[in-house]
Amino acid sequence: MRIAIISDVHNNEVNLKKVLDFCAREKIETIICCGDLASQETLHFVTKNFTGTFYYAFGNMDDDYLREFEHVKEYENVQMFPKFGELEIAGRRIAFSHYPNVAKKLAESERYDFVFHGHTHKPWTEKINNCTILNPGNVAGELFLPTFAVWDTENNKFELIRVHDLK
């Protein structure tokens, strides 16, 4: 199974559409988003253009309306997490948050195999004990080129995808 890891979309629907089209072509049915979609309109855009499961941890640039859980019921394939999310996928314990400091604490807890985060917009990986921390970069293309990551759960390899290389 392959899973897309994205962050920091900041309402850039042009780049987001490229990511979602890539996921459709590659039969990726799960996306983990580490925050900063920025608005309910962008969440709605995701749900109209992606039929798989969408896990989402809030970021600092998400508007207040997006943070209100009442409207989430209309999005059957979305699971939201206010501070950080925890999942087990392919026998691996993972956590994800928007914030690097939260990600570091989660990794240091030694409860997870992988921890994902965003916020800095810079793609990055590091190892803390037996936990790999990964920042997929940013879809918006702010400060750094737009990127996201794909995790192959069969071999636990990660690939960084440049959005501008996609059609």
Image (cartoon, grey):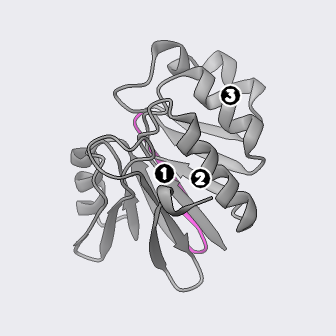
Q: Nearer the viewer, residue 53 or 121?
A: 121
Q: Which residues are magenta?
A: 83-91
In whole angstroms, how far apart are the C-alphas of marks 2 and 3? 15 Å
**Comes first in the chain, label 2 or label 3:** 2
Q: Left or right: 31 with respect to 49?
A: left
* Mark 2–mark 1 CB contact (< 8 Å): yes
**Looking at the rendered structure, which numbered label has been put on residue 6?**
1
Report which residue position mark 3 lands on: 44
Which residue is pictured at 59% across the width and 21% down the height? 40
Q: Left or right: 122 with respect to 90?
A: left
The image quadrant that residue 59 belongs to is top left
Amino acid type, residue under disc 1 in the picture? Ile
Q: Residue furthest top?
A: 65
Report which residue position mark 2 lands on: 19
In whole angstroms, how far apart are the C-alphas of marks 2 and 1? 9 Å
Amino acid type, residue under disc 2 in the picture? Val
Q: Left or right: 108 with respect to 21?
A: left
Which residue is pictured at 31% across the width and 59% down the height? 123
